[in-house]
Amino acid sequence: MVRASWVGALAVLVAGAAVAAVVVAPPAAGVPAQLPSGSPAAQSALWVVARADGSVVRSSGLTWLNRSSAGVYEARFGRDVSDCVFTASVGEPGKGAVPPAGLVFTAGGHQSRAGVYVETKNSGGGLTDLPFQLTVDCAGGDRAVVGPGGLVRGSAASFTRFGVGRYEVVFGHDVSACAYRVTVGDPGAGLVYYPALAFAAGGHLGPYGVYVETKNLGGGLMDAPFHLAVHCAQDPRTGYRGSAVVDAAGGLVRGDGVRSAARTGTGRYEVRFSAAVESCARVASIADPGNGLVYAPGLVFTAGSSFSTTGVTVETRTPDGTLSDRPFHLYVDCGKRALSDENISVLSLNLQGTDSSFGPWRDRHGRLAAWMGATQTVPDLLVLQETPASKCWFLGGCDPKDYEAVFGLMARIESATGVRYRAALLSTGPSVEGWNPLYQGRAVLYNPQRLRNITPVPGTLAIGSPYDSLPLTPAPRASYPCTNPPANWAAYCARVDSTTRDTKYWGPHWAIRPAAFARFALVERWPLAVHSVDVWDVHTSSTEPGPDYALIAQAVDQLELAVPPAPGGRLFPPVLAGDFNATRNDIDNEVATGTFAKYEIAAFPPAPPASDDVVGILVGEQRFFPARFAASGTHTSFLPTGGPGLCGDLPSRWSDHCAVYTELASTP
């Protein structure tokens, strides 16, 4: 399309409508085009691709995603995003069919400043579950959020409102050769009560601007808040990002990193990029390729190409869902959060089995889940000791039954946070109390939106018995078998990482007497590269701490030799979390001169600790292990707080120990 004269376009716009005052004068004519200011290299890539049920397909920088009800989602990232811009598309995460016609809206997080609130609706405006792809633009790029009062935040130099539903956002450089994506979204953390559509075009005031129209579902102009992001040229330091501007006939008008575009049928297009984009986020907007108008309202949807890993399928439709040709701007974000920005959060807690000294175990589990929900804290790993597996009575009956305690905790956490934890292992050893055996040991739960269990497994698991007998050297073991859970928990057996043997669930892990081990990779990096952390769930003896410590230290060394991480693949050195049955002074001495000389304290109650508060977290020193980064504990908490010592009043404790929560940040 040939760009119309700026004067002529402006004259058309202002006819019959007063132009609002420009906040800041646009840049003077003749100023040379330049890339946006800021440091894109320092900008973390933040995006998520989600299914309609809220499950995450791929992401960058995501901590968790929660679907609270039909069409209502909240994405949580690893940083404050309240000053950012949120654009989204309804889009199929994989290849093939494009989702049903629908709308997507964004807002700031309703639960956290690190969150983005998303709603998906059908073409009539009713909340409906739909798959979506969300991108978050922060410092380092051109962006703007516009609300009822004008420009709310962003990098724009000025803003003009021409009349109902007509706006111009002006930036500090020429953006006429860029691609635009615009989403109707609340400027704060509110809601968009009235469904609306947003369209973009080149600036009508000059090449530094982006023209935006917002309309109701019938196509009539109406004021609506929106988020606008502009992509001009990728910076190779930030990972691959591409864009394409395509006219209604399928012609490629311009783009960045794009090779071709074609119309394959009414409202159907195929766009090919110069790199594989199947593992990226794809956001599109109906937008004029030049500085004209989009007269007929429409919707745009994305999907992976069925023909090429470098392709994106795009469909454009009328608001009622009928395929119809429309021009669009497409953006793909393949950037990944820098490794140096990654962290691993761990909560370690001795659950005290089914002992009721500090309240019924179900209540203690409930308090843990309630804290996670109230604070919106979602640890990547829950490292648990004295975890009940099953407690059965000689005269009949079990309370709890197989995995009931673990599954009950997982269910309470899901209710509080929306996150569906998985069990990497439940490593138990027989403990006989007369005719009432209590099988309990170590359990490691993990957030599958952040981590993937990649524990190395030999050709066959060395099964010593139905329960883990925990030999004195590290050996592959099986989790407690999930064979007789209560009926309402049976489906949860699928959340135990395992290889199926007969009808039982065997969770592969490695174990020695006082500890169990599992290896994890960051979901964001899998399978392109394996960046892992080794986690040891520790429960040492209170009567013989020295020999127990030596066993753990030796086991880590042996496993490093037997099953080393992939070359260059480990992110953090090993993490030892659990009940060390020792004071802070004892552990300080072990780190300084004892068997833990290769380790540092990441989180441990300060000396002198309150009685029995012995749960802590150690990390290996980088120089002793093939790790890319050292791990330093930040934002450490000892929970619950208040009352005597470091924990709450005795009846309110989660167990007989403080819980320890810490974020292990990566340091060079």
Image: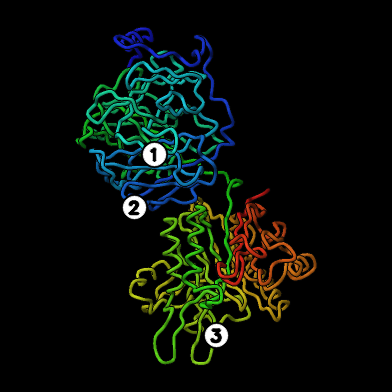
Residue that carries the numbered disc 3 in the rendered image = 431
Point out the tag, 1 or 2, that comes first from the N-terminus.
2
Q: Residue furthest right?
A: 593
* Residue 410: mark in rendering: none
Depth order, front residue of 375/271: 375
Q: Is residue 352 visible?
A: yes
Residue at 50%, 57% in the rendered image: 372
In the rendering, at what x and y percent does residue 228 appear? 42, 29
Structural distance between the alpha carbons of marks 3 and 2:
41 Å
Q: Which mark is residue 282?
A: 1
Crowd band around label 1 with a 10 angstrom C-alpha radius: few (<14), some (14–19), many (20+): many
**Kind of residue at badge 2:** Asp
Amino acid type assigned to the residue bearing label 1 in the image:
Arg
Measured as percent of width and height from the top left, residue 342 is found at: 58, 49
Residue 244: % across, % down = 38, 30
The residue under the point 27% across, 36% down is: 315
Q: Which of the 4 image quadrants contains residue 237?
A: top right
Nearer to me, 442 or 473: 442
Q: Is residue 267 left or right of residue 550?
A: left
Numbered disc in front, either 1 or 2: 2
Please state which of residues 659 and 271 is positioned toward the viewer in this rendering: 659
- The residue pinned by badge 2 equals 53
Measure the C-alpha gap from mark 3 to mark 1: 54 Å
| Disc 1/disc 2 C-alpha distance (Å) | 19 Å
The image quadrant that residue 491 belongs to is bottom left
SS for callout 2: loop
Tell me the quarter of the image containing the N terminus.
top left
Q: Residues within 10 Å of mark 3 (few under 14, many from 20)?
A: few
Q: Earlier in the sequence, mark 3 or mark 1?
A: 1
